[in-house]
Structure formats: structure tokens, C-alpha cells
Image (spheres, grey):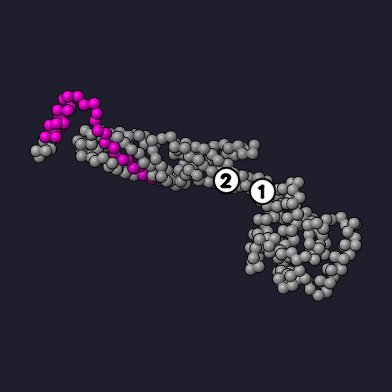
Amino acid sequence: MAFIDYYKILGIPKTATEKDIKTAYRKLARKYHPDLNPDNKDAELKFKEINEANEVLSHVENRKKYDKYGENWKDGEAYQKAQQQHKNSNQQSNQQSYSNEAYSDFFESMFGGQSYNQGRSPKFKGQDYNAELHLDLKDIYTSQKQVLTVNDKQIRLTIPAGVENGQVIKIKGKGGLGVNGGPHGDLYIKFTINNHTQFKREGNTLYIDVDLDLYTAMLGGEITIDTFNGKVKLKIKPETKNESKVKLKGKGFPIYKKEGAFGDLIITYHIKIPTGLNEKEIELFKELQKLNQNG
């Protein structure tokens, strides 16, 4: 009988803990389960190998014997009995109702050739679904309700204000049906946020560039700008410099899942140099130039 490396089958080291074995088994068993791989013989054979490895390694005493004796891990009288059963099974192979193709000879001697669906089928979580939802930045300034159609099923959900571009949220139990009575899978929704506004968003902070005429920048005054929740009047200090920044606290974007909490709005002033001056305006600028030089 050729030696079968059960650790290799489960993809774990010999130092693996019971938890490691259980985790590896469940991951592989779900991947190769026949119900998830219909008409795939290779997956079915792989599934049986995985079950065989788990039967041995998840049993403390069997694992000790396997680690010590390898292919002859059930030593002494039990091993001799297994060999005799194997010999008898070869003589009666044409009368057997199960296939020897997927199990090792010794494993069949141990467990009587039981297949994966003879009363020991494990439960598996259903397949997870993935969906992508495209929204505009202005749409997620407030929470909103949406109805998604995933695999011909309508799913109602509330999208919290402030969701990030590229953010993924999980909706538990809205994926595929479980296998053998296992729980439903989950639905993962990835958000793609398109920005068609004049604002730039970085997290909860919004940025906006505002043009400021030279006269208001020099003399001061008042301007009105648009924000996401209405217009705001701003006082401009005299002699405001180009690229000056002003922070408006609480006028930025909503903070995700924090009701009533907002980031800041950062305004950058860009001073516009007047063009198309008439003769009078040119004369006035010349006068200002002379005053500045004489001063």
C-alpha cells in the first residue's frame, strides 16, 4: 500500500493544531464539495481524500499512531486484520457496491468504504455573493434606502451617509443557500463613488477652490459660497493673499455611522488678476504703482 501523506492533502504541517486541522478541512471540503462542483469527478475524488485525511488527523489517538508508524500506523493485530480485510476486498472487488478509486486501501479497511454522503455530510456555509454599487458623491451626503437585485432577488438596504469610495460592506445571510442545511452565504457590496461636484473629498474633509477678485482681496469684503447643505457667507479680510486657506468646521462630509458628525471644509482662495482694463483703470493702477514706489 502506497503511503498517503494526510498532512499534504490538507496542506498543513505536522505541527498543526486541532484548530488548524479543522480550519483546513472545512476550507478544502467546502471548495471541493460535490454539491458545489456538479459533474466534476476530480472535485469529488479530492473531496473524498480530504475526508479521509480529516478522519485520521482529527482523531487524537489515530493521529498519534499515524505520526509514529506512517502507513502502518494501526500496528500489531489491528494492522494485520486490516491487511486481511484488504486481501479479502481484492478477492471480492467485483461484488463491492462502492468505489475503491478515491480512498486508500487501508482507509477502506478501517471505515468500511463509507462514502461522504452516508450520514456524515458536514454542513457548509453557502456561497458569498459580490456586488458593486455606483453612486454620486451628493447621493451619500445623507443616508438613503436602496433596493438591489442580486441573483434575481430584491434586497432592501440602508446606505449610511459618508460611505467611502471603494468601501465594502457585508450583509449577513444574503448570499447563496447553505449546503446540507448550512447557513446562507453573505453579500459583499463594494461602493464606487463618482464625484461630479466642485468639491474634492479626502475622508470626511472637503476641499474647494474659490476665485477672489483682486479688489476684494485687497480691500476686504463679503462673498457667498455653496456648500453641501446650503449657502454660506464669508467675510474676506483686507490684504488676503493668494492661496490663503480658510477652514469651516463641521461643513465637510458626514462621518460614517456617526449621526450628526461632520468633517471640515477647507477653502483655498485664488486671486484673479483683472484683464481688459480700460484707460481709466490703467491710469489708476499707474497711480498706485507710483505711490508704492515713492512710499
22 is higher (above) or lower (below) than 219: below
Q: Residue drawn 64% across and 59% down?
A: 23
Chain part drawn in magenta = 261-290
Q: Which quadrant would the C terminus be assigned to in this image?
A: top left
121 horizontally vs 280: left or right: right
Name the residue rendered at 49%, 37% in the picture: 135
Q: Nearer the viewer, residue 102 or 198?
A: 102
Q: In the image as oriented, which residue stretches furthest toward the front?
A: 2
Q: Position of residue 170 (x, y in %)?
A: 56, 47
Query: In the picture shown, does residue 171 fall above or below 70?
Result: above
Q: Which residue is mark 1?
A: 126
- Identify the mark nearer the N-term, 2 or 1: 1
Give the spatial CA distance, label 2 vs label 1.
Answer: 13 Å
Left or right of 160, for residue 113: right
Residue 115 visible within the image = yes
Q: Which residue is mark 2?
A: 188
* Residue 273: percent from left, percent from top: 24, 33
